[in-house]
Image (tube, rainbow, N blue to C red):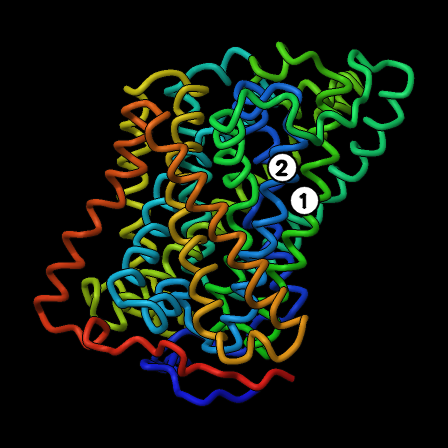
C-alpha cells in the first residue's frame, strides 16, 4: 500500500523507541479479544445492562455491535495510512484537526484510567470470592487484593511487549476455552431447565423504554465492546502493521460479539431478571446454575483471568497513547521515556499506576462495589463514544477521494464507519443529560480537564498543533 502524502510525524521505532516487529496477526487478535475482556465484561456489566433494558440485552448488544464493527473497519483502514502508537490521537489530528486529535487521545487516557478502578475491583472481588463469599463483599479487602493484581500487571507491562503477549496467550486462551465450555453447558441446560422461554423479541426494540432506554443500553453495550482497539495502539510493535493491527481488531469484534450474545441469551434463559440485575457477577450465578459446586467455579476463574488480562491491555493502550502524545510534545516529555533493553514507556506506566491507585483507593468512599462499577461503566461509555465517533468520521474524510471507486470502498470505508460515528455521537447526546452527577463529573468532566494541557502545549508552540489537516489529501492505493 502506498499513500500520496507522508504522515506529519513518522513513528519512531528501534533502539530509541518502541520495539518493532514483535507481534503478529494472531497476537493482534488475542490482544483485541483480551482488550474487550469477554468474561470480565459479562460478569461485571450484565447487571447494569439488565437494569436498564431488562430482557433486551441481546438487542442492545446487536444494535450496538453493528455500528461498532463500522468503527473497527475505520481503525482497520486508518492503520493503512499510518502506524502510530497514538492511533486515534494521531489519525484524527492529521485528518480532521489537531485539537480534535488531542481530545480523542485524552478521551482514551481518561477512560483507561477510570477503568483501572472498574477492572481492579472485580479482580480483587473475584479472587476473594473463590475462597470466601463474605470476604468478597469487604470493599477494603477487595481494594487491597485488586491493587496487588494491578501492580503485577504494571510489572508485566514494564517488562516488555514480548512478555505481555505471552501472558495474554495463556490467560486469554484459558478464558475463552472455559467460556466456550460453559456456553455449550448453558445451551444444554436451558433445554430442560430454562426459567424464561426464548423469544426473538429479545433482539428487537419492543423491550426498550423508548429512545432513552435504547440509548442507555447502547452506552453500556459500547463499554462491552471497548478495548479491541488495543491492537492499533500496538501497531508500531506489530509485523506488517498496516494489515495485522487493524485486521486483528475486526476479528476481535466478531469473536466477542458471538460470546456476548451467547451468554446474554443464556442469562435470560437460565437466570431470572431479578437475579441477573442484583448480581455483581452474573457468570458466577450462571456457572452454579449449569454446573453446581466446584465445576461452576471454573467460570469464576475465567472472570479472574479476563479481568487481570484486560488490566494489562488497558495499561498498554493508555501508556502507548501517552508515549505518542509525549513524543509530539503535547504532554510532558517524561511520559515518553523508554526503558533501555525493554523498550517500553516505563515512566508513563508508573504515572498511570500512581494516579489509578489513588482513584482506586478513593473509590472506597463513593459507595458499594456495585455502585462504583455502574458509575464507572457509564462514565467510560461517554469517553468511548467521543473517540470512536471521531475515528468513524476521520476515515471517511481521509479516504474520500476513493470512496466511490467501488461498492466495497463505499460501504466499508464510508457508509458503515459513518453510521458507526453517528450512532456513537447520538448515544453521547442522549446519555449525558440522563446520567447522575458522578457519571457526568468523571465522564464529561474528565474530558474537560484535557483542555488544560491542550491550551498549555498549544501555547508552547508544539508542532503537532501547527500541522495543517490533510483533508482530502490522503488517497491510499489498497492492495
Mark in the foreground, 2 or 1? 2
Q: Residue at x 51, y 41 (%)?
A: 222
Tell me the CA gap for discs 2 and 1: 8 Å
Residue that badge 2 annotates: 61
**What residue lies at 50% left-to-right and 46% top-to-bottom?**
423
Q: Secondary structure at mark 2?
A: helix
The residue depicted at 43 percent of the width and 41 percent of the height is 150
Q: Residues within 10 Å of mark 1 (few under 14, many from 20)?
A: many
Q: Is residue 330 left or right of residue 289?
A: left
- The reply, left or right, for residue 152 in relation to residue 459 is right
Residues 348 and 372: in front is 372
* Residue 14 visible: no
- Residue 348 is situated, as x and y percent measured from the top left of the image, at 30, 58
Q: Nearer the viewer, residue 430 or 311?
A: 430
Q: Is residue 102 visible?
A: yes
**Which numbered disc, 2 or 1, marks the residue that appears first in the sequence?**
2
Residue closest to the eye, 243 or 426: 426
Residue 387 rendering spot, x and y as whole percentages: 40, 53
Q: How many marks?
A: 2
Residue under label 1, please give it. 257
**Relative height, residue 294 to residue 234 (above, below):** above
Q: Residue furthest front?
A: 404
Residue 21 in the image: state x and y as whole percent: 54, 78
| Neighbours of disc 2 within 10 Å: few (<14), some (14-19), many (20+) | many
Locate the C terminus and report the quarter of the image it occupies: bottom right
Kindly check if marks 2 and 1 are in contact, taking CB atoms under 8 A apart as contact: yes
Which disc is residue 410 wearing? none
Amino acid at each position: 500500500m502506498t499513500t500520496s502524502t507522508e504522515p506529519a510525524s513518522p513513528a519512531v521505532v528501534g533502539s530509541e523507541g518502541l520495539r518493532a516487529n514483535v507481534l503478529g496477526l494472531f497476537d493482534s487478535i488475542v490482544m483485541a479479544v483480551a482488550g474487550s475482556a469477554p468474561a470480565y465484561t459479562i460478569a461485571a456489566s450484565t447487571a447494569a445492562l439488565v437494569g436498564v433494558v431488562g430482557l433486551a440485552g441481546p438487542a442492545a448488544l446487536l444494535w450496538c455491535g453493528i455500528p461498532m464493527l463500522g468503527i473497527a473497519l475505520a481503525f482497520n483502514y486508518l492503520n493503512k495510512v499510518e502506524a502510530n502508537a497514538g492511533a486515534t490521537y494521531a489519525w484524527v489530528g492529521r485528518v480532521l484537526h489537531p485539537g480534535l486529535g488531542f481530545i480523542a487521545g485524552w478521551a482514551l487516557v481518561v477512560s483507561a484510567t477510570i477503568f483501572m478502578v472498574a477492572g481492579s475491583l472485580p479482580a480483587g472481588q473475584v479472587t476473594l470470592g473463590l475462597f470466601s463469599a463474605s470476604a468478597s463483599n469487604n470493599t477494603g479487602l477487595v481494594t487491597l487484593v485488586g491493587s496487588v493484581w494491578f501492580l503485577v500487571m504494571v510489572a508485566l507491562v514494564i517488562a516488555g511487549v514480548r512478555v505481555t503477549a505471552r501472558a495474554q496467550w495463556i490467560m486469554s486462551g484459558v478464558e475463552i476455552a472455559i467460556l466456550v465450555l460453559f456456553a455449550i453447558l448453558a445451551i444444554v441446560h436451558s433445554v430442560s431447565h430454562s426459567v424464561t422461554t426464548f423469544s426473538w423479541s429479545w433482539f428487537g426494540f419492543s423491550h426498550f423504554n423508548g429512545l432513552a432506554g435504547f440509548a442507555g443500553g447502547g452506552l453500556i453495550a459500547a463499554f462491552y465492546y471497548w478495548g479491541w482497539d488495543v491492537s492499533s495502539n500496538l501497531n508500531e510493535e506489530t509485523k506488517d502493521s498496516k494489515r495485522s493491527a487493524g485486521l486483528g481488531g475486526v476479528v476481535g469484534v466478531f469473536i466477542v460479539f458471538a460470546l456476548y450474545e451467547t451468554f446474554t441469551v443464556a442469562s435470560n434463559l437460565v437466570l431470572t431478571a431479578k437475579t441477573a440485575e442484583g448480581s455483581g457477577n452474573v457468570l458466577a450465578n450462571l456457572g452454579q446454575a449449569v454446573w453446581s459446586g466446584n465445576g461452576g467455579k471454573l467460570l469464576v476463574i475465567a472472570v479472574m483471568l479476563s479481568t487481570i488480562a484486560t488490566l494489562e491491555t488497558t495499561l498498554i493502550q493508555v501508556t502507548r497513547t501517552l508515549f505518542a502524545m509525549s513524543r509530539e510534545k503535547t504532554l510532558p516529555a517524561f511520559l515518553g521515556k523508554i526503558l533501555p533493553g525493554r523498550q517500553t514507556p516505563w515512566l508513563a506506566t508508573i504515572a498511570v499506576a500512581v494516579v489509578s491507585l489513588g482513584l482506586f483507593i478513593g473509590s472506597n468512599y463513593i459507595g458499594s462495589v456495585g455502585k462504583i462499577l455502574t458509575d464507572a461503566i457509564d462514565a467510560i461509555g461517554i469517553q468511548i463514544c467521543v473517540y470512536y465517533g471521531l475515528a468513524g468520521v476521520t476515515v471517511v474524510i481521509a479516504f474520500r477521494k476513493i470512496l466511490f471507486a467501488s461498492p466495497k470502498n463505499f460501504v466499508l470505508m464510508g457508509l458503515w464507519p459513518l453510521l458507526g460515528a453517528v450512532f456513537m455521537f447520538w448515544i453521547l447526546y442522549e446519555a449525558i443529560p440522563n446520567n447522575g452527577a458522578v457519571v457526568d463529573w468523571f465522564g464529561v468532566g474528565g474530558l474537560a480537564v484535557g483542555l488544560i494541557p491542550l491550551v498549555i502545549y498549544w501555547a508552547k508552540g508544539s508542532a503537532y498543533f501547527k500541522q495543517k489537516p490533510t483533508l482530502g489529501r490522503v488517497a491510499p492505493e489498497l492492495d
